[in-house]
Image: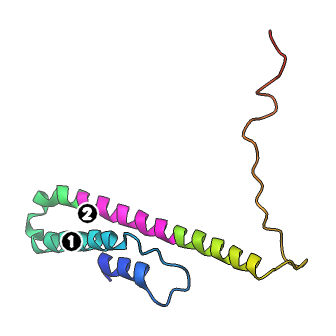
Amino acid sequence: MNCSEYIRVLLFDPKRQDIVIERGSDIFVKLAEIYDLLVDIKQKFSVKDQDFGQLNGILCEIRSKLDSISQTFEKMNGDISFIFNSIEAVKNGSDSEDEEDDTVYVEDDISDGDIQEGDND
């Protein structure tokens, strides 16, 4: 599977149960297609590898960015799925005592020793 096929499966796979972010996904498919074209160019001209040293660096950078993008999409899908599952649980009135408490507590970033009131030394 080449890069553009992988990105298409990642973004548009109907078998996936989680929510797939489609906004801007065409851009990622196009980037993957460009990557595949650059790989094809390199393979066709592999006789002159020394001339393609720069191309190899570009290919590695594009591949790295595409991997990062796909990881971001997977994380976003997981985050959004969690949010929607939480909303569904609240809508369905899951007040059972058997369930764990999923309450998120936000702590203050200011530690107790940093600010002292009335200290004018």
- Residue type, mark 1 in image: Val
Mark 2 surroundings within 10 Å by alpha-carbon count, few (fewer than 14), some (14 through 19), many (20 or more): some
Residue 64 magenta: yes
**In-front residue for pair 32/41:** 32
Name the side, left or right, on which 77 lies relative to 99.
left
Residue with the mark numbered 1: 39
- Which residue, as the protein is rendered here, is positioned at the far front? 91
Residue with the mark numbered 2: 59
- Which residue, as the protein is rendered here, is positioned at the far bottom? 15
In the displayed structure, 116 sits above or below 65; it is: above
**In-front residue for pair 88/56:** 88
Cα–Cα gap, marks 1 and 2: 7 Å
Q: Main secondary structure of the magenta part?
A: helix
- SS at circle 1: helix
**Magenta stretch, residue numbers:** 58-74
Residue 28 picture location, percent across and down: 33, 70
Q: What colouring style does the render use?
A: rainbow
Residue 32 picture location, percent across and down: 29, 72
Residue 69 picture location, percent across and down: 41, 65
Q: Who comes first in sequence, dot 1 or dot 2?
A: 1
Q: Residue at x 32, y 82 (%)?
A: 5
* Quadrant assignment, res 88: bottom right
